[in-house]
Image: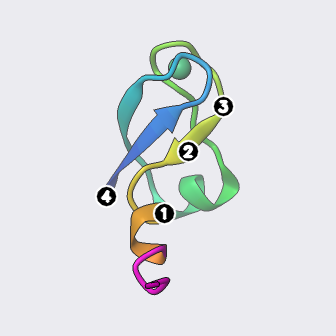
Amino acid sequence: MPSYEFLCGKCRKEVLLTLTIGERERGEYTCPACGGKELQPLMGSFFSKTSRKS
Ligand SMILES: [Zn+2]
Protein backbone atom coordinates (compact mmCIF):
# COMPACT_ATOMS: atom_id res chain seq x y z
CA MET A 1 0.00 0.00 0.00
CA PRO A 2 1.24 3.51 -0.73
CA SER A 3 2.17 5.93 2.00
CA TYR A 4 1.17 9.56 2.02
CA GLU A 5 2.56 12.51 3.93
CA PHE A 6 0.07 14.87 5.52
CA LEU A 7 0.24 18.00 7.56
CA CYS A 8 -2.31 18.05 10.34
CA GLY A 9 -4.14 21.35 10.51
CA LYS A 10 -5.01 20.73 14.13
CA CYS A 11 -1.74 19.81 15.83
CA ARG A 12 0.53 20.99 12.96
CA LYS A 13 2.39 17.71 12.84
CA GLU A 14 3.63 16.02 9.72
CA VAL A 15 2.34 12.46 9.67
CA LEU A 16 2.94 9.53 7.35
CA LEU A 17 -0.10 7.35 6.72
CA THR A 18 -0.43 4.15 4.76
CA LEU A 19 -3.77 4.22 2.94
CA THR A 20 -5.59 2.30 0.29
CA ILE A 21 -6.76 4.31 -2.72
CA GLY A 22 -10.36 4.04 -1.50
CA GLU A 23 -9.54 5.28 1.98
CA ARG A 24 -7.71 8.25 0.53
CA GLU A 25 -10.49 9.15 -1.91
CA ARG A 26 -13.16 8.97 0.76
CA GLY A 27 -11.07 10.88 3.27
CA GLU A 28 -11.17 8.02 5.73
CA TYR A 29 -8.03 8.96 7.58
CA THR A 30 -7.29 10.77 10.77
CA CYS A 31 -4.22 12.18 12.43
CA PRO A 32 -2.61 9.46 14.56
CA ALA A 33 -1.37 12.09 16.98
CA CYS A 34 -4.58 13.99 17.78
CA GLY A 35 -7.32 12.14 15.89
CA GLY A 36 -8.19 15.22 13.84
CA LYS A 37 -9.43 15.03 10.28
CA GLU A 38 -7.89 18.26 9.03
CA LEU A 39 -5.08 16.60 7.16
CA GLN A 40 -3.57 18.28 4.14
CA PRO A 41 -1.53 16.19 1.72
CA LEU A 42 2.07 17.37 1.48
CA MET A 43 3.05 15.69 -1.76
CA GLY A 44 0.66 16.17 -4.66
CA SER A 45 0.05 19.78 -3.84
CA PHE A 46 3.70 20.33 -4.66
CA PHE A 47 3.48 18.52 -7.97
CA SER A 48 0.37 20.36 -9.10
CA LYS A 49 2.10 23.68 -8.71
CA THR A 50 5.00 22.89 -11.01
CA SER A 51 3.01 23.80 -14.13
CA ARG A 52 2.51 27.34 -12.87
CA LYS A 53 5.74 29.03 -13.88
CA SER A 54 6.03 32.77 -13.95
ZN1 LIG B 1 -3.03 16.11 14.54
Q: CA distance from mark 3 to mark 2?
A: 9 Å
Tell me, yes or no, whether the two marked residues, 2 and 1, touch with CB atoms within 8 Å.
Answer: yes
Q: What type is the residue that disc 2 sits on? A: Gln
Which residue position holds label 2?
40
- Disc on the earlier residue, 1 or 4: 4
Camera-side residue: 24 or 50?
Answer: 50
Q: Is mark 1 within 8 Å of ligand 1?
A: no
Q: CA distance from mark 4 to mark 3?
A: 19 Å
* Amino acid under disc 4: Pro
Q: Nearer the viewer, residue 25 or 48?
A: 48
Q: In the rendering, which numbered label is found on residue 26? A: none
Q: Which residue is disc 3 drawn over?
A: 37
> Residue 26 vs residue 54: left or right?
right
Q: Quadrant of the N terminus?
A: bottom left
The image shows residue 50, relative to residue 1, as above or below, that is below
* Residue linked to disc 1: 45
Looking at the image, tell me whether mark 2 or mark 1 is earlier in sequence order: 2
Classify 10 Å Cα crowding around label 1: few (below 14), some (14-19), many (20 and above): few
